[in-house]
Amino acid sequence: MDDLAGRWRNAFAADGLLKDSTFYEGTKWNYSFRLLQDMAGRIALAGGDAAFVKLLDRFFGIGAAPVRQPGEAPTKAEMAAGAALGRFEGFNNEPDMEAPYAYVYAGRHDRTCEIVRAGLDQCFGDTPGGMVGNDDSGGMSSWYVWNALGLFPVAGQDLLLIGSPLFASARLELAGNVEFTIAADGNAADRPYVASAALNGRQLAGPFLRWAEFAGGGTLELQMSSQPHSWSTERPPSASAAGVS
């Protein structure tokens, strides 16, 4: 891999997180799980799949004791206490909005499904407080739309990661009169996990599409389940992984 493209490693410390610095609207935790062009290298730097997943679980508060949520017009002290937890901010800011999909690169698509679905259900709604924070020129609402469809585009790459759609079926009209349909068979609030995925009848080995596959149209069929499944054997392309581009 090109030397310049690999210098992202210099920003990380031995604990698998970014080095201490001054971070805008967040902590090093919020910025440590961006989707890099070399997620295989990122996971290896953190100590491998299990260690990386452990960091992500800590970030999202999985297994941690419940905390009291701030109410309306929280005080500065409440906000400071929340920031000190170092946990996910709640889908209300761009620095960590892609973090749920970091699990995909470590072979834990089930975790992605759990967190994305929880975010869609709990952080957005049709009430005056239904938009989670400042929409930032469409940042939050576009996150909602993509994830409600069950897809997430990776910035700077020709990848769409598969998540956990809200709808049983959705049809998109793309450029050139092309249609793309997402069919989530058996989808329900208690069935957030993907048990298998097929594109135009071809079974997928991993939870991702290339942009050309999406733009070419067709049908993505997802079998939804109430239990996690280990159907995914292929991980999204990563710069340092042999045989991918």
Image (cartoon, rainbow, N blue to C red):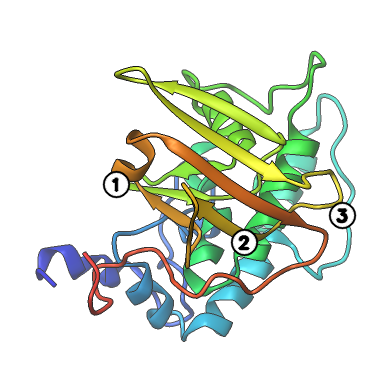
Circle on res. 67: 3
- Left or right: residue 139 compared with residue 82: left
Whichever of labels 1 and 2 marks the residue nearer the N terminus, that label is 1
* Tag 1 residue: 158
Mark 1 is surrounded, within 10 Å at the Cα level, by few (under 14), some (14 to 19) or many (20 or more) other residues, namely some
* Tag 2 residue: 196
x and y percentages locating residue 101 in the rendered image: 53, 56
- Left or right: residue 240 compared with residue 135: left
Whichever of labels 3 and 1 marks the residue nearer the N terminus, that label is 3
What amino acid is at disc 2?
Ser
What amino acid is at disc 1?
Asp
Whichever of labels 3 and 2 marks the residue nearer the N terminus, that label is 3
x and y percentages locating residue 192 in the rendered image: 75, 52
Query: In which quadrant of the rendered view does residue 89 lie?
Result: top right
Which residue appears farthest toward the top when viewing the image?
Answer: 128
Q: Residue at x 78, y 37 (%)?
A: 121
Element assignment for label 1? loop
As drawn, 32 above or below 22? below
Mark 3 is surrounded, within 10 Å at the Cα level, by few (under 14), some (14 to 19) or many (20 or more) other residues, namely few
